[in-house]
Every structure is written in structure tokens, then in C-alpha cells.
């Protein structure tokens, strides 16, 4: 569902162009006057839905580039109910990259060079009948996972933990 990329960019002109359309956040120690950090964020609207794509610019001694985070199924299909197959990703990311170029008014490196920092995987189960679905959901609600807090809902269940969560 959600994916977060790091796009390495060495060209300072590209970074400055993105900075010019972003919001800047600073953290300063008011006691000492020392600047702790500065970062830039931007939101762009692309794809088939109204949700924004989050972009965070990184420009320091160690990294220079962008973090881009969004829901691939929502971008491609307008929802995260319909499943997107791995074989669909190159076409979807190519389109996303082209739209991102337009929105940012710049050219980013090819998506095949983007590093994946986060990926939330999901799978859509389709059952033949409502009764079959309810039986399986009833079974899933009886499961207990170690170190997970179970939150049952009428039509689903979520297991919260510190490292990851499970939703059914």
C-alpha cells in the first residue's frame, strides 16, 4: 500500500528549485541560539485521487535528495481496495515520475535508482460468499499474537505493536 522512496539528487539547482516551492521548518535552541536542523517539505497532487504526495527534501553532509511517500494503489486506482500486482509497478511508477516532473518543474533520476525506505504490503482476499467472509473474519478475531494489542471491529480486526501492525 504505502511506499517511501529516497531519490538521490546531487544537482544543487534541482534541489534549490524544489526548495522554492516547499515549506521550510527550522528547529532552534532558544537558549543557545544554535540551529538544530532545517528541513523542507512539499505536497504535490498527482494521480487519480485528491490526497497529496508527501515530499521531504534532505540536503546535508551525508544525504542530498528527496523522500517521496505515497500510496501506490490510491495513486493508480483511486483507492486501496483494488489490488495492484507487482508486474504493474513499472508502468505506474513511470507515470508517477512523469507527473512528478511536471509538478516539481524538474527532472528526477529514473525511478529504478530510487531507494525503498518503507513499504507496506497488503493483500486483498476475495471470498465467494458473505458467509465465508464472516467465518474467516471470526477466525481471525480469535487469534492472539504475542506483544500485540488486539482491537476488534465489527468487520475487521487490528493487532497493534511497536515494530509493526497487522490488519485483517
Image (tube, rainbow, N blue to C red):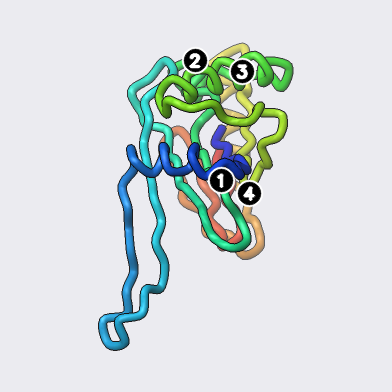
Residue 86 x %, y %: 71, 22
Q: Nearer the N terminus, badge 3 or badge 2?
A: 2
Q: Is residue 88 left or right of residue 23?
A: right
Q: Nearer the N terminus, badge 1 or badge 4?
A: 1
Q: Is residue 166 left or right of residue 36?
A: right
Secondary element under disc 3, as helix, strand or loop, is: helix
Residue at the image point whose x is 61% and y is 22% from the top: 93
Residue 65, numbered circle: 1
Q: Nearer the N terminus, badge 1 or badge 2?
A: 1
Residue at the image point whose x is 30% and y is 81% from the top: 33
Choose between 117 and 158: the one closer to the eye.
117
- Residue occupied by mark 3: 94
**Image quadrant of residue 49?**
top left
Q: Distance between the Cα atoms at labels 1 and 3?
A: 19 Å
Q: Distance between the Cα atoms at labels 2 and 4?
A: 32 Å
Residue at the image point whose x is 54% and y is 26% from the top: 107
User: Pointer 1: residues within 10 angstroms few (<14), some, or many (20+)?
Assistant: many
Secondary element under disc 2, as helix, strand or loop, is: helix
Q: Is residue 90 above or below residue 52?
A: above
Q: Nearer the N terminus, badge 4 or badge 3?
A: 3
- Residue occupied by mark 4: 143
Amino acid at each position: 500500500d504505502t511506499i517511501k522512496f529516497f531519490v538521490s539528487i546531487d544537482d544543487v539547482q534541482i534541489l534549490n528549485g524544489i526548495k522554492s516551492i516547499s515549506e521550510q521548518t527550522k528547529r532552534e535552541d532558544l537558549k543557545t541560539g544554535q540551529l538544530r536542523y532545517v528541513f523542507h517539505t512539499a505536497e504535490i497532487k498527482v494521480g487519480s485521487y485528491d490526497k497529496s504526495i508527501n515530499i521531504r527534501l534532505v540536503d546535508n553532509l551525508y544525504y542530498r535528495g528527496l523522500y517521496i511517500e505515497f500510496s501506490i494503489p490510491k495513486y493508480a486506482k483511486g483507492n486501496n481496495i483494488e489490488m495492484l500486482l507487482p508486474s504493474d509497478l513499472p508502468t505506474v511508477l513511470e507515470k508517477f515520475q512523469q507527473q512528478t516532473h511536471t509538478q516539481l518543474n524538474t527532472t528526477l533520476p529514473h525511478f529504478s535508482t530510487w531507494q525503498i525506505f518503507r513499504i507496506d504490503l497488503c493483500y486483498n482476499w476475495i471470498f465467494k460468499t458473505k458467509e465465508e467472509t464472516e467465518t474467516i473474519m471470526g477466525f481471525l478475531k480469535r487469534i492472539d499474537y504475542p506483544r500485540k494489542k488486539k482491537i476488534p471491529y465489527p468487520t475487521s480486526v487490528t493487532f497493534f505493536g511497536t515494530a509493526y501492525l497487522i490488519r485483517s
